[in-house]
């Protein structure tokens, strides 16, 4: 949902507008704040958190592009936002931005992406802005699923694969191909690939989208990173999402730290990748799965690792 499409209304006259706070939407419609919150939660096509973040980020970006000499306090006063909000969405330290425009006339300074966020779509948008500014999306997604990665309005890749297709199709709007088909593709056919594997271990029959064991998880890491290495051109970009966690053995209640992120990095380096960047996804809840093997996140965040193929 983009902010220029503001004609969605509920029966109470609430207009979906990410440029407004929930209270401002409530005041405009003459309803309570609770009514607006219920509307946002129950309307499946409203992704307010992501749309609001995108709106605020663009406001801050545009302000500093137009006023490169301005301070963060100037931006807060002009945009009528809090200083913490400005600091959250600014994409380049102000002092460094000032230095970058000195002696360069009206040439705009280059913006860096946010390194920390609480939504997948915001991080992916920043990665694309920095590493794939012309293509605006990845060449290939090897773990497309139902396309949840792109629910924040991101452009969907043309090449979509998954080992487990929902309803033998994946997304009804954007069908995916079986992963076996990707294995038949020629070497070096893509310039960018994204991989988002499950982050849980659950050996029960609960139906949770999870690995059955730690070994199967790391084996899959190896398989998918190897496939990506083969399919990528030299200089290609790989984005690999992962998370560190604590594994509990239900029989003796022992806990062991599993640094899955380091494991992924080590194997990628062996394959000829270079770790170019990493982004942190902040989590608000501990991850807990059912079954005899249970995990919770050791830290409340995941990682988006950005690799470049150098061999």
Image: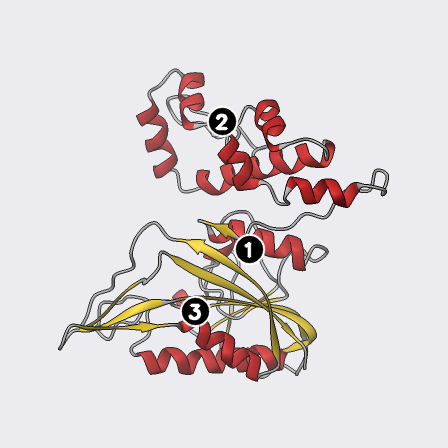
Marks 1 and 3 sit apart, C-alpha to C-alpha, by 15 Å
Q: Is residue 303 left or right of residue 57?
A: left
Coordinates of residue 34 in the picture (x, y in percent): 31, 26
Residue picked out by circle 1? 124
Q: Given contact means CB atoms under 8 Å apart, are the residues at marks 1 and 3 in contact?
A: no
> How far apart in space, not on screen, are marks 3 and 2 (Cα)?
35 Å
Residue at the spot 48% in from the left edge and 53% down from the top edge: 120
- Residue appearing at x 56%, y 40% in the figure: 89
Label 1: state its secondary structure: helix
Image coordinates for residue 164, horizontal then vertical, percent: 41, 72
Count of numbered badges drawn on the protein? 3
Residue displayed at 49% across by 35% down: 84
Mark 3 Cα-neighbour bin, 10 Å: few <14, some 14–19, many ≥20 = many
Q: Pointer 3: what residue?
A: 197
- Helix, strand or loop at label 2? It is loop
Percent x, y for residue 177? 52, 71
Q: Is residue 204 above or below residue 116?
A: below
Which residue bears the numbered disc 2?
20
Q: Secondary structure at mark 3?
A: loop
Closer to the chain start, of discs 2 and 1, is 2
* Protein image colouring: secondary structure
296, above or below 203, in the image: above
């Amino acid at each position: 949902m983009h902010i220029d499409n503001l004609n969605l209304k509920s029966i109470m006259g609430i207009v979906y507008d990410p440029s407004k706070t929930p209270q401002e939407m409530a005041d405009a419609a003459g309803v309570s704040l609770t009514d607006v919150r219920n509307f946002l939660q129950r309307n499946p096509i409203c992704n307010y958190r992501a749309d609001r973040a995108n709106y605020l980020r663009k406001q801050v970006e545009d302000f500093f592009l137009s006023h490169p000499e301005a301070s963060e306090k100037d931006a807060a006063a002009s945009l009528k936002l809090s200083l913490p909000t400005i600091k959250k969405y600014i994409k380049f330290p102000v002092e460094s931005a000032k230095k970058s425009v000195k002696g360069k006339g009206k040439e705009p300074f280059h913006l860096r992406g946010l390194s920390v966020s609480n939504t997948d779509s915001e991080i992916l948008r920043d990665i694309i802005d920095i590493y794939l500014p012309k293509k605006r999306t990845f060449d290939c997604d090897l773990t497309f699923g139902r396309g949840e990665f792109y629910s924040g309005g991101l452009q969907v890749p043309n090449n979509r694969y998954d080992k487990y297709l929902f309803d033998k199709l994946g997304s009804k709007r954007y069908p995916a191909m079986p992963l076996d088909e990707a294995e038949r593709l020629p070497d070096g056919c893509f310039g960018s690939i994204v991989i988002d594997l499950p982050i849980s271990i659950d050996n029960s029959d609960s139906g949770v989208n999870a690995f059955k064991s730690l070994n199967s998880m790391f084996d899959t890491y190896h398989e998918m990173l190897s496939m990506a290495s083969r399919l990528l051109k030299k200089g290609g970009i790989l984005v690999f999402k992962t998370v560190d966690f604590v594994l509990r053995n239900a029989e003796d209640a022992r806990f062991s730290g599993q640094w899955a992120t380091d494991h992924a990095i080590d194997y990628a380096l062996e394959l000829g990748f270079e770790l170019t960047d990493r982004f942190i996804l902040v989590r608000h809840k501990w991850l807990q799965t059912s079954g005899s093997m249970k995990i919770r996140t050791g830290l409340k965040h995941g990682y988006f690792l950005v690799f470049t193929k150098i061999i």
